[in-house]
Amino acid sequence: MSFETLGLAAPLLSALQKAGFAEPTPVQAASIPKALEGHDLMVSAQTGSGKTAAFMLPALNKILANPPKDRGVSVLVLAPTRELAMQVGEAAKSYAAHCRDLRVAVVVGGMPYGAQLKALSRRVDVLVATPGRLMDHIQAKRVKLNTVHTLVLDEADRMLDMGFIEDIESIVARTPSDRQTLLFSATLDGTVGNLASKMMNNPLSIDVSGHREKHANITQALLYADNVDHKMRLLDHLLKDVNLSQAIIFTATKRGADDLAERLVDEGFSAGALHGDMNQRQRTRTLNLLQRGRLRVLVATDVAARGIDVQGISHAINFDLPMQAEDYTHRIGRTGRAGKDGLAFTLANVSERHKVRRIEHFIGQPIPVETIAGLEPTRVARPTFKARKGNGGGGGRRRPAFNNGAPKKFGEGESRDTRPSRPVRAGEGNAAGRSEQDSRKPRHGDRGPKGASSARTTGRPGNFSGKRSGPAGGGRSSNRAAAH
Ligand code: AMP
């Protein structure tokens, strides 16, 4: 299928050509024609799937078909975080590059008011906003939404998680009731479903893939560790992978992100932290360094990393497990962008098995357990995803190590290939290996068994330099992004 067959206007097609997009992604192919027909849509889509173009192209198409008569906002996009909103704004500008005199403005929290006031004092066709800051502008009567014909709720599940429901309701109430509403979310059930039923008109549901098929280009692995020191050594090993171009590491806390970034800088990595306690200037600077490839390792918290779209990120590493199972998919979705392959490693203590199980149930498949020769945990975790008899699944039993297990001494070797021996991709999970409870609920996108829950040994132990024990730093702030 080509973009030409979707019915988009010529200026949009030429912008897509310039962007190098040869054909629509599945979410674009499924959503764009229905949106162009005027339907309200509820779309289950992950970041990295091309969802921004899936809503932005039909929205821009509508502006081109009915050029606005007055200066009011035509398309309003609400997004949970400033990073995502800024990224959507940039995408809108690139898709609208060949549309004459089409104006895009972004208003987000944590940024100075000056530029936003200036943007809002002029005509705005596409407004991308975080809900809180938009409410400020609405209350100060700087923006009116009575001309909005297309409302987009991007990452609606996350906006609800972040407590934006009241702001969203009051923003939506200011838009015309005959608008078109396009809702994008990782999940469509629960509170998102309630929100949709209140503000959408007979929406079509589009779910291009089940959880297990999402991130099919990302190879996942779970590494058990005995303690923080052990995690550090595993991390050090992973970061020395010859195939690593850029990595994003997730920590549970802002302080943990600072400490780890600082420690990695001390060890000679080009590393920086990204979290909500940094001011916007620091965050933008760090993101720019990452975009330009000047920063190899970003240590981030969940909210700060949300929406980061950097195609060079080859590795996503969960240093701490996510609080919510759903965040796991958002985290690993920072790698494998734009059709590239990615690696996602999760470090967990054996005592955190129950959290791993929750994640596995959410994604509908086991995360393959790996060990690194010389860095194996002393305690072996029982499999969290039990295989049923006769299904040929690995059931989490340990397979013989594929290498001779001879540990390399610390100090030997500089960089290694840490890829698992046989890449196991998301979606290759042992479908029959779900727990009984889970297997009663057939999921869209189930695939055949491949024994993904067995443990394997991979790679060699790392050359470990610098500090080794205990959590790093003393709480100093390491917003610096040192490039070495
Ligand atoms: P998104 O899910 O919208 O954040 O998009 C993820 C990445 O995919 C972005 O870098 C987009 O520029 C890129 N992208 C979106 N649509 C396409 C397409 N049809 N072909 C190639 N890359 C795309």
Image (cartoon, helix red, strand yellow):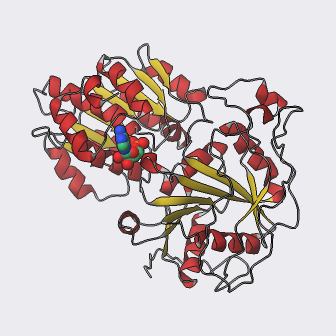
Residue appearing at x 70%, y 39% in the figure: 429
Quarter in which the N terminus is drawn:
top left
Q: Find residue 331 and report its horizontal and vertical position in percent.
A: 56, 51
Q: In this view, does 110 lie to the left or right of 419?
A: left
Q: In this view, does 393 lie above or below 462?
A: above
Q: In which quarter of the image is residue 250?
A: bottom right
Q: Quadrant of residue 66?
A: top left
Quarter in which the C terminus is drawn:
bottom left
Q: In which quarter of the image is residue 316?
A: bottom right
Q: Find residue 451 and report its horizontal and vertical position in percent.
A: 77, 42
Q: Find residue 208 and report its horizontal and vertical position in percent.
A: 50, 28
Q: Is residue 419 above or below residue 219?
A: below
Q: Find residue 259 and report its horizontal and vertical position in percent.
A: 60, 74
Q: Which of 122 and 206 is in front in this view?
A: 206
Asked whether the viewer can see residue 105, the reply is no
Q: Is residue 202 left or right of residue 441?
A: left
